[in-house]
Image (cartoon, rainbow, N blue to C red):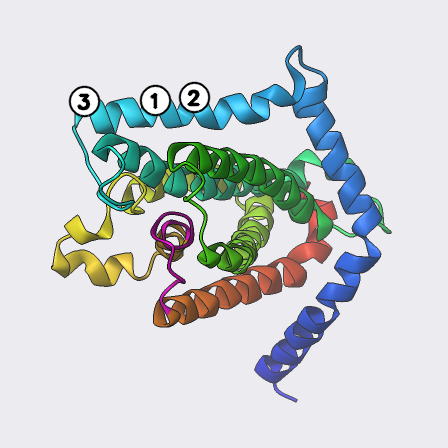
Amino acid sequence: MTTAAAFLTKGTKRLVSYPALVLKSRGQIWTLTKRELRGRYLSSVFGGLWAVVNPVVLLLVYYFVFAKIFTARYKGLGTDLAEETQFGFFLFCGMVPWMAFAECLQRSTNIIIENANLIKKVAFPSEILPIYVLVYTFINELIGIGILLISLLVVTKGEGLHFSLLFFPVIALLRMMLTLGFSYFFSAFNVFVRDVIQIVSLGLTLGMFMTPIFYPMSIVPEQYLPYYNLNPMMYVAEGYRSVFLEGVIPDFGQLMKFVLMALGVFTVGYGFFSATKHKFADEV
């Protein structure tokens, strides 16, 4: 068997055994998640209230800058709502998943080094470290989604919820798979090249403005659209707006592209992590 074939075979076996590994380690994952939640919120004066305050404050800041200073607009909820209100919801749908994605990626990049004491334990499954960060950030995302839904119900007088919301779990699951793939790749890479965490931070800053969070895709010049189509988070932002604001199911063609991207990123990221994890203990 050639080296390439052997590598492919090993990679396939790792992917096939991945669900069993996660299921077996679910207790440890939840323990680490609870530890993170306690450390972030329960030990502070205002506790879990910060999980609500943080996204709301960020939304208000960005809303003020783009809706008031730059007078950005987006018409997407109908004529019964004020234009600035529409833009507020438009912005929130882009910010909530991006914040979860960015926080998870930034935290996960350094997670192996931060948990060197656990990595050096032979029996500890290092694969669960990016997972618990993903679970923690998804809980925060769900809080933001809850705020969005309540706001929609209040502003639209109970008419802001649509059948299309049933597609939210699909988009959220794909977003989590994409995030986990990137997290696996960069957390492993950062063990060997410590500059990676700085590169990820810079990349997230650039990515936030290259993703249609503050502006609609309709204003992007046509010559740049092929580059935007390569950005998987574009599909997330557009998908959230479709199901929450426009009341339509995501475009099938766009959804299939996102499925392939999420699967591809996860396969490469987890494959790289699995192939290098045996060296972590020596490097950290």
Q: Which residue is mark 2?
A: 57
Is residue 166 part of the magenta span, yes or no?
A: no
Mark 3 is surrounded, within 10 Å at the Cα level, by few (under 14), some (14 to 19) or many (20 or more) other residues, namely few
| Residue 83 vs residue 44, the one in the foreground | 83
Mark 2 is surrounded, within 10 Å at the Cα level, by few (under 14), some (14 to 19) or many (20 or more) other residues, namely few
Tag 2–tag 3 contact (CB < 8 Å): no
Q: Quadrant of the C terminus?
A: top right
Q: Say whether disc 2 or disc 3 marks the residue closer to the N-terminus.
A: 2
Q: CA distance from mark 2 to mark 1?
A: 6 Å
Q: Say whether disc 1 or disc 3 marks the residue closer to the N-terminus.
A: 1
Tag 2–tag 1 contact (CB < 8 Å): yes
SS at badge 1 = helix
Magenta highlight range: 240-251
Is residue 246 part of the magenta span, yes or no?
A: yes
Judged from this view, the residue extending furthest toward the bottom is 1
Query: Splitting the image into 4 quarters, where does residue 135 fall?
Result: top right
- Percent across and percent down for residue 222 are 13, 59
SS at badge 3 = helix
Disc marking residue 216: none
Disc marking residue 61: 1
Q: Name the residue: 49% across, 68% down.
A: 264
- Percent across and percent down for residue 216 are 24, 47
Q: CA distance from mark 2 to mark 3?
A: 17 Å
SS at badge 2 = helix
Q: Name the residue: 58% across, 26% down.
A: 51
Q: Which residue is mark 3?
A: 69
Amino acid found under the numbered disc labelled 3? Ile
Amino acid found under the numbered disc labelled 1? Val
